[in-house]
Amino acid sequence: MRAGPLGQTAPVRPARPADLAALTRHVHDAAPQLGPVRLVCVDGPAGSGKSTLAGALAERLGRAGVGAAVVHLDDLYEGWSGLGGVWARVEEQLLAPLADGRPARYRRYDWVAGRFDGWVDVPVPGVLVLEGCGAAPRAVDGRAVLRVFVEAPDDVRLARGLARDGADMRDHWLAWMAEEAAEFAREDTRARADVVVDGTVPW
């Protein structure tokens, strides 16, 4: 067991509610490890509450005087089968230029059209919050100032997903849940996280 950056041992079991004030202080005070950028990775399974946490953390950082950009991996996956190939695009289009202190830009995937369509510019931020399944693989170790794993029970996550995407997406969701579980096992994502958060508790 090792100490996480907030002083607790990691992995944290059971998961606890997010202490946004503590997370904000930690990121605010951390030295950049990705060139001039403080990289925060919010990982965890689909429907666990990652986007909500990422947005809330970025908003608090902004109030603390730190400019934070949020990038959702949903915009970089190549559809429902895109988890496995997303990291090469993250490295090439986002992390490599930001590490050099240059603005980044990434191609956004259009889920309706089924293709990448258009570019999104990312000026060099004080903090980049990278959110999505697979956002904290081993490749970020030594470059991220904070790795968060958000989790929730499978039935809760599936219900959230189908409420958002429609019941006809059930097979896609079940296949994705199996793929993300394999990703987390391969990368040992939960055990490597600095903080493990209960996505069923409001923050």
Image: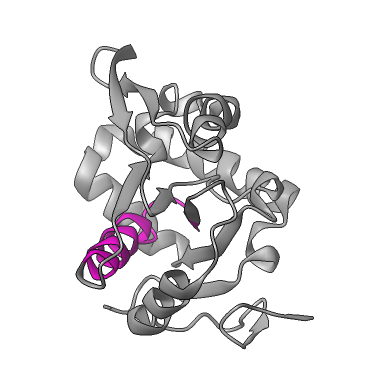
* Farthest right residue in view: 1
Above-or-below relation of 38 to 130: below
Where residue 64 sits, quadrant-wise, is: bottom left
Q: Is residue 81 left or right of residue 55?
A: right
Quarter of the N terminus within the rendering? bottom right
Which segment is the magenta one? Answer: 40-62
Closest to the observer: 159 or 72?
72
Where residue 160 sits, quadrant-wise, is: bottom left
* Farthest bottom residue in view: 7
**Residue 98 image position (x, y, % from top left):** 49, 37
Q: Is residue 5 left or right of residue 197?
A: right
Above-or-below relation of 196 to 83: below
**Residue 79 image position (x, y, % from top left):** 41, 24
**Residue 197 image position (x, y, % from top left):** 46, 74
Q: Is residue 57 magenta?
A: yes
Residue at image point 38% right, 54% down: 126
**Residue 34 image position (x, y, % from top left):** 57, 48
Closest to the observer: 164 or 127?
127
